[in-house]
Structures are given as structure tokens and as C-alpha cells.
Amino acid sequence: MAAKPIVHCDEDTDPTARLLSAGQRLILEAARLFPAGVERDERSLWLEAIVDEVPDYLFFKDRDSRFVIANRAIVRDNQRNGIETIEGLTDFDLHPHHVARVFYETEQEIVRSGQPAIDMEELVRDARGNLKWLLTTKLPVFGDAGEVIGLVGISRDITERKRAESLHVGQAHLLKMIALGADLGQIFSSLILMIEAHVPGVTGSILLLSPDGRHILNGAAPNLDPGYCKLIEGAEIGPRQGSCGTAMWRGETVIVADITIDPLWDGLRDLVAPYDFRACWSSPIRSYQGKVLGTFALYAQAPGEPDAECMKLVGMATHIAGIAIERKQAEDSIQFMAHHDMLTGLPNRVMLDERLASAIDAADETGGVATLAFIDLDNFKLVNDSLGHDAGDKLLRIVAARMLACVGPDDSVVRLGGDEFVVLLSGAGPDDAAVEGRLKAVREAIAVPVEVERRSFQVTCSMGVATYPAHGRNATELLARADAAMYRAKEIGRNAVQVFTTEMATSVHQKLERQEELRQAIARECFVLHYQPQMDLATGRIFAAEALVRWNHAEKGLLPPATFIPLAEETGLIGEIGDWVLKAACRQNRAWQDAGLPPIVVSVNVSARQFQDKDWVERVASALDESGLAGCYLELELTESLLMVDVSGGVETMRRLEKLGVNVAIDDFGTGYSNLSSLKRFPVDRLKIDRSFIMDLPGDADDGAIARAVISLANTLQLRVIAEGVETREQLEFLREAGCDEIQGYYLSPPVEASAFEELLRSA
Ligand code: C2E
Ligand code: MG
Ligand code: MG
């Protein structure tokens, strides 16, 4: 399309004259726009004035690119005096050759083609040496015959706009980097380079505040001497710690115009001396909530302060850096949350899978092993149910921290959920003394009484151990087997460790079947009580019997309590079994009394779940009521660990039992972790020394010492004391000599059916 001629000339023959008049005509044409009534000459003067006042460059050039007319802006920026000094010159007279060449070629193309060049962006250096961006349009000027006689040009200084634009592009680029999760160091470097490009003569640096809020960490400083950055790393922040250390400390911008004299740099002057900085301006980078995260600083080689424009850029930079840091922190915390348990801060199942996979890989490579211990807290449910979830949470946190303290730096303690944990030990099998030691330490650490809400608790744990590659070929199998071993530890009475064996591979299915079987046994009351006599050593009289439950299984015969009590406790079925035992024992004892036998005390074992049951004391009362047995002929055997779970709650329940006249004994004494001060608070009548301390008497000196200690402790606390599991005459003599009041055990009689026990009583 042919360009629309904007100027028509008179038929002058001299092209320059023609062009001049063309210029005048342009002015005159434009002048037509002026309000009527203004004189023509006056209007042309005004128009000239306007052309001169316009800050843009306006000019006419002839066909050879010689200036014919130039406005004042051109004259001024080329440091000329008066418009005449430009007339007849070309760009080659005003600009470096390579710049002028580009202008010239464009213009000659316009002259040749008659086509305008619209909105060209040009980078030029003006006579003062400043780089400038121009937006230029050049249009051909046609003579009457339609030939190009020259061109008219207009250029606008768009340096500011270009700056803003490039900042905009830079910002957008940085925000994109942030959004895409680019490396923080890369984001910082790009940010610094962008600012450096806009502020001549400065070098940027980003420093971070350490998580403890006290030390400086390097962020990025692409153009700063790495030696200097190294010197700063780890330095403490403070009220006179250079520009950045002080800015972090104060949480405000610190402008140091001259490092060599500013007191803030007193302690660091020698450090910075070799690096040739004179000024350092530092601004804090803040989080959205205003927390100081680091600093953005500019170093200058010349002393001085930054101008407002520079500080505006710094403001933008700290803002972007803040976003980047916060985004990284958010990402890190999401990452952390995905891999950790929020309550305890321990790694979670996801992390376990990763660590287990790499432990297995490492074992494959080195021919080594990896050991996995599955841990379930024994009495946790009780704590949670009786004291609420807050107390439960607190307990889990404490236990988690203790476990962590017991293992090595290469081991992992993982919380799977609830009260289930896994400890992963790399490098050795469960027979290895070091591994055994670490696992033992974990168990002991868990069992140390915990103080929560001014109450003292004790939780024990059941632990199942499996080792790669001996017990499982992959992570899933290994976990399942450690889990199976843990169940076995529960079954044998909790507070125990079991290493996986193939017999343990009983399926969940089998377990469910057994549970169902037990439920039916309860419904049909397929249980019997056996009674084991207890003898007073002073008189030789049988004065009491412990009632011990057996499951009368249709196919398997009589099953001992160890085979079903743990399952009953786990599933809550123990409540119903316990009620049955309690009633049956009271009824039987009353029946013996009614039959005219010498009255004895019947001892009934109570499991933790029963004891925690809110209306348990009422049930005991109604068992006595229904049977007509006096409270003083009933004794309840509680275990130490059961009482330690909730000392004050326990004391209260026992006081209520005391009111019924019922006796309380502590069973299996010595195997738990009673603290003696709590023991004093319990209204207990008897201690039953655990069979494990009696078994090796009188040969074993340690057991002998423990038995003696328990006996003398009981004497001090004015409690009666009975030894369980006495099998030999020698054991009996030892105990008698040590001051023990009473014994129970095979030496006297194993637990026997009610009828057999009746015989025993009669013959005594
Ligand atoms: P326990 O209360 O410590 O009961 C003593 C256990 O030691 C009984 O095992 C008894 O048969 C055994 N025993 C007694 N004298 C000797 C001896 O001289 N040598 C040896 N080797 N063993 C002896 P049993 O009947 O198998 O009961 C085991 C555990 O089951 C009991 O330990 C008790 O904790 C629990 N249990 C029994 N009946 C009940 C019950 O009705 N309810 C609850 N919750 N637990 C019960
Ligand atoms: Mg007992
Ligand atoms: Mg016992």
C-alpha cells in the first residue's frame, strides 16, 4: 500500500527550498487547527513554539538524510547551540559511525521504497554518554509528482518505559521461577543480577537469617568476592554488626554511606578492607507476617547514599526475595509434613518405606542386614481413655523423644500411628550385642514413669523384631513379620520382646477365628476356675486360694490363661471374662463356707482394663452381694504396671474397694517399675513376690538379695508378703528364714479343681 503523503510542495525546482517550504506548509497546515481569529503569522509562531516545546525529537531530512529542520530537543541533546548548527548535518556528524549507519540505512530504504518505518525501537547513546531508548517513526515526504523528496521523523524517549518494562519482565520471570520451585540460590542470583543491571556501580548480596534467629547464612551474591561471602557465613547478628547484621538485628534498613568511618562497621573494618567497598546499604527481607528472614544489600565502591529510585528497586527486591523464601519454607514444611508425624515430629510411614528400601539396598550391597523392631505401647489405651487425648498426646511425645535418644544417628524411629512405632536399625542383626543393647535401651526408656498433668504413669511396650534378609525378602514382608512377632510379645503377657520365627506367621484370619471362638466361649460360659492354695508359714494353715481361670475348650481341652487372656484384653472381651471369674469365685467361696469349711480368702486376678472401668467397684460390690460373701474373704490381685498407669486414679479406686472390706494384693511384684513413693500411697494389703525371683533360690545370690529386699520393704511398709511359685523345700526354708509370711506354689499344690481343693481344705 502506498504511503499517504502528509505534505505537498509548491512547484519549486530546488529540492531543499521545496522541502523548506514543505516544512513551513506542515506548520501552516497544522496551524489550521488553531482557533479562528488568531493571526496567521502569530499562529505559525505558536506552532513553531509548540514544535520546540515538544520533548520528543521532531525533524525533517532531505533525500540524503541531511537535517533540514530539527526541534529544540534534538539541538539540546546533541549539545548544540541553535537550530542552525544542525542544519545540513547528517547522523554521521552527530553519532558514532555504527549507530549513524543504522539510521542512514533505514532512511534510505524509506526514500527508496516510499514506505514509512513506524514505531522502531532504537538504543542510542546521547552526547552526554547516556544510553537511551527511542521509539521512532519516520515517514516519507512526497513531491507533487509523487516522488520522495525527504522524510519527517519523530522520536520519543522511552528509556523509562523500557526500564519499567524490563523490570516487569524480570519480575515476571522471577515469579515464574518461584512458582516452578526453582532453586532458591538461582532465584536470588537472578534477582540480584536484575537489580545490578538497573543500578549502575553496585554489587548485590542476599543473606539469610538462620533458623535460630541469631546467625547470618549466605543466600547469593553472584558478583561478590566468594572470599568475602565465606567470611560472613555464620557470623552473629547484633546492634553493630556491619550493615546486614545490624539490619537483621534491628529489622530495619541500614544505610552506611562510608564503611571506613561508620561505627557500625568498627568490628568488621579489617575484614572488609581487602575488598574495596565503601558503601553498603542493607534492607531486611521480611515474611508476610513481618518476620525478618534475611537482608538484601547493595555494596558500592564509591561512598554515598542510594537515591530514591534505587531504594524503590531494593524494596521490590526484598519483596520478591521474601516471597521466594516463604514459598521455599512452605514447600519444606509440606515436604516435612508429608514425611513426618505431626504429633511427635518423628518420620512417618512414607519415610519408613523410603528408609527401609535404602536399608535393604545397603544390606544387599554390603552383604549386611537391617533390623526392624515393631513397637506397640501396652497400656496406652488406658491413659488415653482415662485421662483424655491431651494427656495421651503428651505421653506419646515424651515416649517418642526418649526412643529417639536411645538409637544411633543412622537408625530411624518412626511413628506409624496411634501407639505404634517402628525402630529401624541398620547394619546388624538382632543377635548382635549392639542391636540388642539399643532395643533394650528403647524398652527401658519407654518404661520409665512419665509425669503428665501432675500424675505419674508407666507404659511398657511389646516389641517384635524381624531382620532382613533372614525374616523377609522385602519391606512389606519384613514389616508384617515384625508385626507378627510383636503380637506374640503381647500374647506372652506384654512388656516383652520377641524375635520373629516361622511359627509366628499365623495369619490375621486365624486370629479373627480365635477371637470369634472366644466370644462364643464367653456366651456359653466355657470356663472353669482352678484354685491354688496359699499357706501361712507360721501356722502351716491354708488360709487362702488364688482363683485361676481356664478355658474348657471343646476340642483342645483345658487351655491355660496365657493362651487367651492377652487376646481377651486386646479385644475388650476381658471385661466379660473377668466378671464371670469374680462372680464364680465369690459364689464358690461362699459355698465352701456354707459347707462348713474353715473360711478362707479367695484371690481373683484383675486386668488393667477391668480396673479402669468406671463402674468396676460397683460390680465387685454386686458380686459380693449376689453371692453373700463378706468383703474380707475376697482379695483382688492387681499388677504393678496397672497401678502405675494412673497412680491417683488407682488410689481412689482402691479406697473405694477398701470400704467394701475387700483386700488388695500387688501381683508379680518386682517385674514392673513401681516407684516406692507411689507404693506407699496405695492402700495395699499384700505383695506377691514374682515367681521369677523365687525360681533360682536359694542358689542365685541376686535373686536372693531381691527377695530379701522385697520382704524387708513389705515389713517396713507394714504389708504382708507372699512368695509365688515355691516349688522346693529349700526355697521354702530360704523364705522362712528371710522373714516371708506366706507361700504359694507347686511345693504345696498346683492349681486344682474346686472339688480337689475342697479335699485339700478338709484334710488340712
Ligand atoms: P499369676 O496371677 O501370677 O498366677 C500364677 C501363675 O503361676 C499361675 O499360672 C499358676 O499356675 C502358676 N504357678 C503357681 N505356682 C507355680 C509354681 O510353683 N511353679 C510354676 N512354674 N508355676 C506356678 P496360670 O494359671 O497359667 O496363670 C497365669 C496368669 O494368667 C496368672 O498369673 C494371671 O496373671 C493370669 N490369670 C489367671 N487367671 C486370671 C483371671 O481370672 N483373670 C485375669 N485377668 N488374669 C488371670
Ligand atoms: Mg495372680
Ligand atoms: Mg503372679
Image (spheres, rainbow, N blue to C red):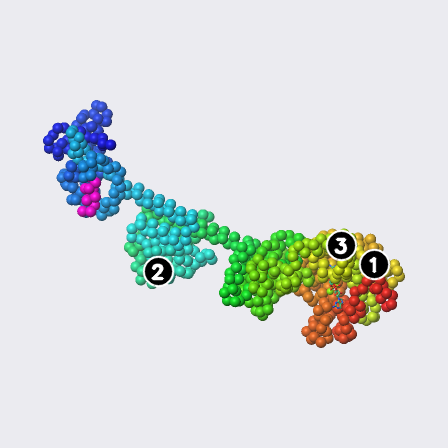
Say which residue label 2 marks: 226
Q: Residue at x 16, y 31 (%)?
A: 143
Would you say 449 lies left or right of 259 here? right
Closer to the camera in the image, 314 or 97: 97
Q: Residue at x 34, y 49 (%)?
A: 194
Q: Secondary structure at mark 2?
A: helix
Is residue 645 at all visible to an observer of this figure? yes
Q: Secondary structure at mark 3?
A: helix
| Residue 335 coordinates in the image, percent (x, y) | 49, 53
Say which residue label 1 marks: 588
| Residue 149 coordinates in the image, percent (x, y) | 16, 34
Q: Residue at x 38, y 53 (%)?
A: 186
Give, as a single range, the part of the protein colored magenta.
97-107
Say which residue label 3 marks: 521
Q: Secondary structure at mark 1?
A: helix
> What's the amino acid at mark 3?
Ala
> What's the amino acid at mark 2?
Pro
First reached walking from the N terminus: tag 2 or tag 3 = 2
Count the numbered circles shown: 3
Would you say 524 lies left or right of 257 here? right
Q: Which is in the foreground here, disc 2 or disc 1?
A: 1
